[in-house]
Amino acid sequence: MRVEDIIELFREDKPRVSSEIRHVWAVFWANFKIFLSYRTWVIMETISTVASVAMYSFMGLQVDARRVALAGYGEVDWLSFALVGVATANYLWMCISRLSHSLQHEIREGTLEPIITSLINMRSYIIGQSIRGFIVSGYFMLGVLVVGIGILRVPLVINPETILSFIAIILLMVLSYAGIGIMAAGLILVYKKGDPLTFLFASITEFLGGVLFPLKYLESIPILYAIAWLMPYTYALDAARRILINGATIFSLNVLIDVAVLLAYTIIFIPIGLRVFRWGVNRIRYEGTVATY
Amino acid sequence: MEYAVETFDLTKVFVDKEKKGAERYVKAVDHVNIKVKHGEFFGLLGPNGAGKTTLIKMLCTIILPTEGTAKVNGYDILKEPVKVRSCLGWFHGETGGRSLYWRLNAEDNLRFYAYLQNVPKDVAEKRINALLEFFELSKDRKKLVKDYSTGMKVRVMLARALLHNPPILFMDEPTIGLDTISAVETRKLLKALNTELGKTIIFTSHNMFEVEQLCERIAIMKDGRIIADAPPSVLREMLRDVHAIEIEIREVNNISETIQSLSSLSIVRKVVETRNDSLSIIVRLQVDDEYEAIPIIASKLRSLGVKVSAIRRSEPTLEDIFVRLTKEGAA
Amino acid sequence: MDVKRLIEIISEDIPRKKTPIYRIVLSFIIRDFKVWWTYKFWLLLDISGIILFVITYYLFSLITTSQQVQEAGYMVGGYFTFALIGIAFQQYVHFAVQSINESIREEQWNGTMETILSTATDFKIFLLGEVCFSFIVSSALLLMSLLLGILLGAEFYTTPTSILTAIILTVLLIASHMDIGILSAGVIMKVKQGSPVTWAFSWLSQLVSGVFYPLKLLPWYLEWLGRAFPLTYSLDGIRLCLQSGKDLTSPAILSNIMCLIVFVIVATPIALYIFKVGYDAARRDGSLGQY
């Protein structure tokens, strides 16, 4: 290939096609491929997911079933109760930590600079990254549920209606946290480290959200109990349990209340998150720290 | 007339936060005003740390200016960043092959940016193939970038900057990580893009001869300021009567005293710089006539008891231009 | 200062003494402490992580029965004390092994490992230095979580002899996990990634060593697998001491101690050998300073 050939090629110039969907797709696909290239990590993470489910099943042998009934899902065995909690909590944690993780990576490797000089807007970038996060985390959540239902015979109610309702609740849960996740991403841009924060955030969610025990037991500590009911996760978990344990659907009254709360969080936080993120991008452009290699 | 690039008192001050709240201000770019015509091959010459990269990054909308603004292709970098981005290609050689996705192969990297730059699919594939072949990467196109050598990574980055066929190219040290042959090919390509397709190219380097060869006009930058803006012929003219010699000093008791007494000689115009070589100190002087100067300086050094391993004539360098320019500025 | 004077000073030949090992190890500990102190935020995070962990299992214990724990021979304190000991000691060794790995990786990243190994320090002492500091920090965290547990109502059966026996078991626990840390450090030097050894070890031991439940609840094959892990013996021994007041006179404790000693005797040469292999391999392909 000679210089003249390249020149000839560039002489014909087709008009560019502007499409946000293509941008989202490009970001998703590139990052998904990067994820797949970490093969050892994927395998290790898969095995530890399976191991954790097994561990919970043995823990369940020591639980007094009457006390789980206090949670208000009827006569339910603890493993069903915990499995739904673990699956949703892991999903949430993965979504949020993946986004912050890959953003930090882009800053460190200097790949954010060429992205800024390109035509993609930050909204498409975040959506692309998030879709990657949903799918990757979905894989691990499916792992938890398949092992639980298939191997350990956990009696969850599985039919088309509950599956669709459950997926809808998961989406709502992620959306209700999207604003916070994007806000965290904006702060990571500026302060360059966020892993500690998302980690702390995740462990608090897991602890206060009632993953392993009914929230009733938190009532003796009013402050924690109040905080627990301020977190969207608590509502999402409640809805998910009603669906998978009691066979409710998204149109059942109790679930609808949860859905309303989740929607409210979504509507309030996403605009705030986007604003913080935009602030973050402009701030690092001003400071000149878009890349920190 | 509308310019391809026009800056208006463009300034960037970085704040270095030190411990205990103390702040240090670094003026990376200081009230720069340049105008680049459409289709011009414009060189930005300066030593490392002169502010070239910051200037370029501001024009590419990666960094926001502290003061002033600029227009790229007629669009304001502050008010219409998206339009600015649609007409520029950016390359930054100093990263040494970072800024690519190391866990993707060359092809996927280029395809990713082609999508982000809104290049239609068929056109993108054609260009990716051609550019990979031109930069001799066809063989390794399926290999992950992390297994590439630095030179190969730099070539992928060059391809990325050209992929969307932008009318204005910002080439920040494009030949820095390349071997001699690829550097020559790259310069040829840039020249052809400029002459055949009329692309505006802003080219930075700290290599004076590279810039002189390629550019129609050269701006010289130092400490954030443009200290000269002229065609290379003027630059060459400026250097024509520069006569420089270099002294290699092996052993000396007091270097500053020695330099003092050298500069007091009537034949010495100015001491340009002193730098270290592996085992000796090199002092560079501008003189009126090098053949007259050498014996005079040699005897002076002998009387001072300085041990010298060589005194020689020397080709003009970037440093000489700086000295010329700052002296003229003062006069 | 001119060159001649400097050369005079350096060439003044003081006979070199062999630095005592404890001095070298101490200098490692001091250096690590200084580096670690700059990451205060991480410390805060480690602490809050452990606090949350303990409280979560406190709340979980409220819905459990103590029946299985008592059937397994741990008489006092019920499920919460049982789980507290499990978590505290499992985190203890996990943290220690992990930080050995991290410091090795960090040294490789920064290229400081090349510098250290180019000084006259023997690699075994180098290892000991790296390992010591990790155990000091994790011991502090261990004590903290036990104290928090007591605040939340954990009960221990404490007699001087049972505490002493528990300490002996802890020392053996440390010794056996140093081997595991060294082994995985050797693997890291070769593969230059977060060690799969540490990871697998950490997960498996959580699953089969009886951290959250008595081993009796496991199916026979997992119970059998659990016997391959030193943590299993240490946890059983420590619980028998602190929950049932057993001491060195009890045959159950003695058999736990014997198993740990056998593990240490067998594992130490293997771990050192694997570390040496990894270290030599890294030197061979010149990647000690690489990441």
Image: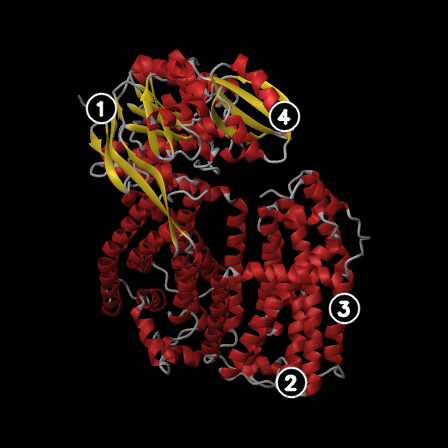
For mark 1, name the chain.
B
Q: Quadrant of residue C205?
A: bottom right
Q: Quadrant of residue B252?
A: top right
User: How crowded is the residue under tag 4: few (<14 C-alpha within 10 Å), some, or many (20+)?
Assistant: few
C-alpha separation, residue under disc 3 versus residue under disc 1: 81 Å
User: How crowded is the residue under tag 3: few (<14 C-alpha within 10 Å), some, or many (20+)?
Assistant: some
C-alpha separation, residue under disc 3 versus residue under disc 4: 80 Å
Q: Residue furthest left?
A: B1
Where is mark 1, residue-wise?
B3
Q: Name which residue type carries label 2.
A: Ser
Where is mark 3, residue-wise?
C261
Q: Are marks 4 and 2 on the same chain?
A: no
**Label 2 or label 3, whichever comes before in sequence order:** 2
| Camera-nearest residue between C148 and B12 | B12
User: How crowded is the residue under tag 2: few (<14 C-alpha within 10 Å), some, or many (20+)?
Assistant: some
Q: Are marks 2 and 1 on the same chain?
A: no
Q: Are marks 3 and 1 on the same chain?
A: no
Is residue B12 depicted above or below C44 in this figure?
A: above
Q: Name which residue type carries label 1.
A: Tyr
Q: Residue furthest right?
A: C15
Mark carried by residue B303: 4
Inspect this view and state whether residue B201 appears: no
C-alpha separation, residue under disc 4 versus residue under disc 2: 94 Å
Where is mark 2, residue-wise?
C244
Q: Are marks 3 and 4 on the same chain?
A: no
Is residue C183 depicted above or below A222 in this figure?
A: above
Secondary structure, mark 1, is loop
Is residue B259 depicted above or below A192 in this figure?
A: above
Mark 4 or 1: in front is 4
Secondary structure, mark 2, is helix
